[in-house]
């Protein structure tokens, strides 16, 4: 039996994934659907699927927790989910997140997925909009909460009781009645530990660094058969040729951004820009501080979870489109306060930062108000690759 399947079975026995289990015939995806993302037993099963395909390869698998920037648009081969897919280099990334999967979600997910003794690297990707007056956690969190992930988080013996209490109280503030399902926490933790030991330590492989000798695990891309078919022929793939890819990415962006002054794709300028202005006008009407101290506390909880679990952490600091945001409540000064807030929190927690905030006014970096273009995606891909392969921060210019 695959280790992931064994662990998933144990999680079911001990009360994890209490929500309805997704049909196993649902195809796996590089960017999981919301239903897949909220089914913790599904995520664990996918670890096993990738473990079976990766067992013979000494590649690094990295966990990336973010939001809509992890969605790979059609035809954007530079996007991390595409470029760092299984078999395309000696790093595979497992990207988890959807809109409204914010800092507290990252704290719970990281704590749920980490094993008791695994060395680890993880990337967290926050977003300015999470910290803005647009946030509505009490309305959004009930549809984002995963009981299975929360149960696994609470069962992790390496997370302090004080931090678990902070997370649970914050969930209550966000209109989520989080209660541990099944037997006692001690029993759940014992069951998970036994399953991980009896299996092949699926979660440990998920976080295994390059050169550890441990096979890795994660979410399969385009189904198990496609993954298996591509592995033998590409098992010698190494680091991408960033210079060559960057030349092509700039050419693609130049074609896509040819007819507007905003540094965004023409299609978005025609179809999405008016909606951005509408949302920006709503920000002006909302009361409250420009930047949420509550979201900052959530971000610090995510960093603290990683610190308590000895997970080597890098935060990818995304820019927004300066040309657009300069005309909103979140002008240059407000954005600089946000960037400093994130950097300072990372400094206090000992987390690394891949800082792309200086790219706000680049001609080619974003395809809309905040999502990466071909070139921006390549910057993100290189940052993820270098961190997971070597533990390095790579945020210097590609050009």
Image (spheres, grey):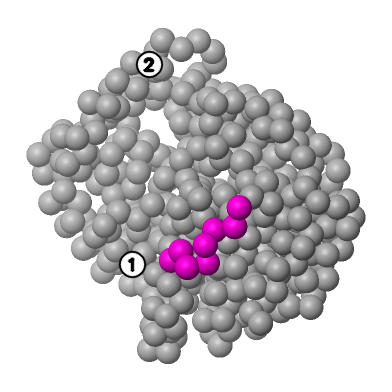
Label 1 secondary element: helix
| Above or below, comparing residue 30 to residue 345 in the picture | below
Nearer to the camera, 204 or 14: 14
Q: What residue is disc 2 on? A: 282
Question: What stretch of residues is rendered in magenta?
Answer: 20-28
In 3D space, how far apart are the residues under numbered discs 1 and 2 (Cα atoms)? 40 Å
Asked whether, in this view, residue 262 is left or right of residue 343, the answer is left
* Image quadrant containing the N terminus: bottom right
> At x 37% / y 72%, what residue is drawn?
240
Residue 26 on the magenta span:
yes
Mark 2 crowdedness (10 Å alpha carbons): few <14, some 14-19, many ≥20: few
Mark 1 or 2, nearer chain start: 1
Nearer to the camera, 37 or 331: 37
> At x 46% / y 40%, what residue is drawn?
99
Choose top left, top right, bottom left or bottom right for residue 114.
bottom right
Q: What residue is disc 1 on? A: 242
| Above or below, comparing residue 345 to residue 288 in the picture | below
Asked whether, in this view, residue 366 is left or right of residue 11, the answer is left
């Amino acid at each position: 039996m695959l280790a992931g399947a064994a662990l998933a079975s144990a999680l079911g026995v001990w009360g994890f994934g209490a929500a309805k289990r997704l049909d196993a015939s649902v195809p796996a995806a590089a960017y999981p659907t919301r239903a897949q993302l909220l089914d913790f037993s599904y995520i664990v099963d996918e670890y096993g699927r990738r473990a079976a395909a990766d067992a013979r390869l000494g590649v690094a698998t990295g966990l990336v927790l973010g939001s809509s920037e992890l969605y790979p648009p059609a035809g954007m081969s530079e996007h991390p989910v595409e470029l760092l897919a299984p078999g395309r280099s000696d790093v595979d990334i497992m990207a988890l997140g959807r809109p409204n999967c914010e800092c507290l979600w990252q704290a719970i997910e990281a704590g749920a997925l980490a094993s008791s003794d695994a060395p680890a690297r993880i990337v967290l990707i926050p977003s300015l909009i999470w910290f803005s007056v647009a946030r509505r956690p009490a309305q959004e969190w009930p549809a984002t909460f995963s009981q299975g992930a929360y149960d696994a988080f609470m069962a992790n013996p390496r997370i302090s009781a004080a931090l678990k209490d902070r997370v649970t109280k914050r969930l209550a503030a966000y209109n989520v009645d989080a209660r541990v399902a099944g037997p006692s926490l001690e029993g759940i933790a014992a069951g998970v530990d036994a399953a991980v030991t009896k299996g092949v330590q699926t979660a440990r492989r998920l976080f295994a660094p390059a050169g550890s000798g441990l096979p890795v695990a994660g979410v399969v891309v385009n189904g198990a058969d496609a993954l298996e078919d591509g592995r033998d022929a590409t098992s010698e793939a190494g680091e991408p040729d960033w210079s060559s890819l960057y030349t092509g990415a700039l050419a693609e962006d130049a074609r896509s951004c040819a007819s507007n002054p905003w540094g965004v794709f023409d299609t978005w300028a025609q179809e999405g820009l008016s909606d951005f202005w509408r949302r920006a006008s709503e920000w002006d009407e909302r009361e409250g501080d420009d930047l949420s101290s509550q979201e900052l506390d959530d971000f610090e909880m995510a960093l603290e979870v990683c610190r308590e679990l000895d997970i080597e952490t890098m935060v990818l600091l995304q820019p927004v489109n300066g040309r657009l945001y300069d005309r909103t409540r979140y002008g240059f000064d407000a954005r600089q306060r946000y960037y400093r807030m994130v950097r300072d929190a990372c400094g206090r927690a000992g987390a690394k930062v891949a800082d792309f905030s200086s790219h706000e006014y680049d001609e080619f970096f974003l395809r809309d108000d905040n999502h990466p273009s071909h070139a921006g995606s390549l910057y993100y891909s290189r940052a993820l690759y270098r961190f997971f392969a070597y533990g390095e921060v790579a945020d210097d210019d590609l050009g």
